[in-house]
Image: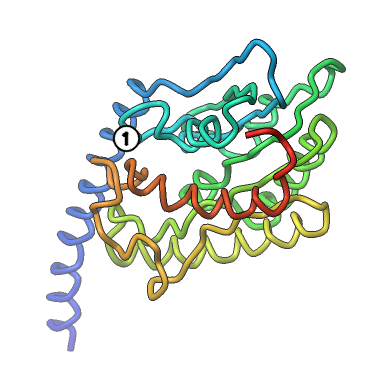
Amino acid sequence: MNIFFLALFFLIIPIIFIEVVWIAYHGILSKKLAKKTKHFSQFPSDPTCKILVLGDSIACGVGATEECNSLAGRLGSLYPGAYVTTRFINGVKVKKALTLIDTSKKEERWNLLVIFLGGMDIIHFTPRKIFSRNISVIFNKAKQCADKVVYVSPANVGLSPIFPFPFSLFYSIHSYFLLKTAKKIAAEMGIIYVDLFENKKNDSFGGKVDFYAPDLSHPNDEGYIIWFNKIKEALDNHFPFYNK
């Protein structure tokens, strides 16, 4: 029996080591993608409305080949008469993203504020209570400076190809519980919630690398289309009244 467990131990350690190297390598690719990504902005002379896109690397559009293919860029295409700008910090967790909203500027009022946050809290295993407190604060600040606030949840992080088993299992579980909390708080505070979380059976990406950028953690153009279609559905229901 001791020999069996010893053999199992020496089998598992190399596998875990290889998986950690795999994740670290693609993490480096992710940082390189982020450095060369240009975020989208749109400033018409006579805007029909003002839209702020706020968050992490997803808000920036990391993984998209062009700014117009990012989620912010697709918002600009959906509302061509809108003033659209982006504020982001790559790799930011919810707590530090609070600095992106300045409620002290009375003139800074948005018709629509779209938030993309939470992925890094999942990856870094932010405790549920801390995440709950931080997301509540950012929702509250967002409501103070916007007519409509939309929170776009991260997808099921555990299903990203960058994470092999057992990391995938841990991240899927943590994704579920953190996003369940975010959804509950959003409902209580009147925040429009766009749910990108799916279990493995119903995953829109189908676990295919075809929908991911080379870092295997951010969507590519096709992946962003799938996500944006869900955002558009929510906007058609809650934000249809501005001239497109």
The residue positioned 22% from the left and 40% from the top of the image is 25
The reply, left or right, for residue 146 in relation to residue 180 is right
Judge whether 64 appears above or below 3 on screen. above
Q: Residue furthest front?
A: 243
Q: Secondary structure at mark 1?
A: helix
Judge whether 18 appears above or below 39 on screen. below
Q: Position of residue 46 (x, y in %)?
A: 69, 14
From the viewer's side, name the closer residue of 43 and 215: 43
Q: Residues within 10 Å of mark 1 (few under 14, many from 20)?
A: many
From the viewer's side, name the closer residue of 33 and 45: 45
Q: Which quarter shows the N terminus?
A: bottom left
Q: Position of residue 201 (x, y in %)?
A: 38, 75
- The quadrant where residue 147 appears: top right
Judge whether 40 appears above or below 17 on screen. above
The reply, left or right, for residue 44 in relation to residue 8 is right
The residue positioned 68% from the left and 33% from the top of the image is 243
Q: Residue furthest top?
A: 45
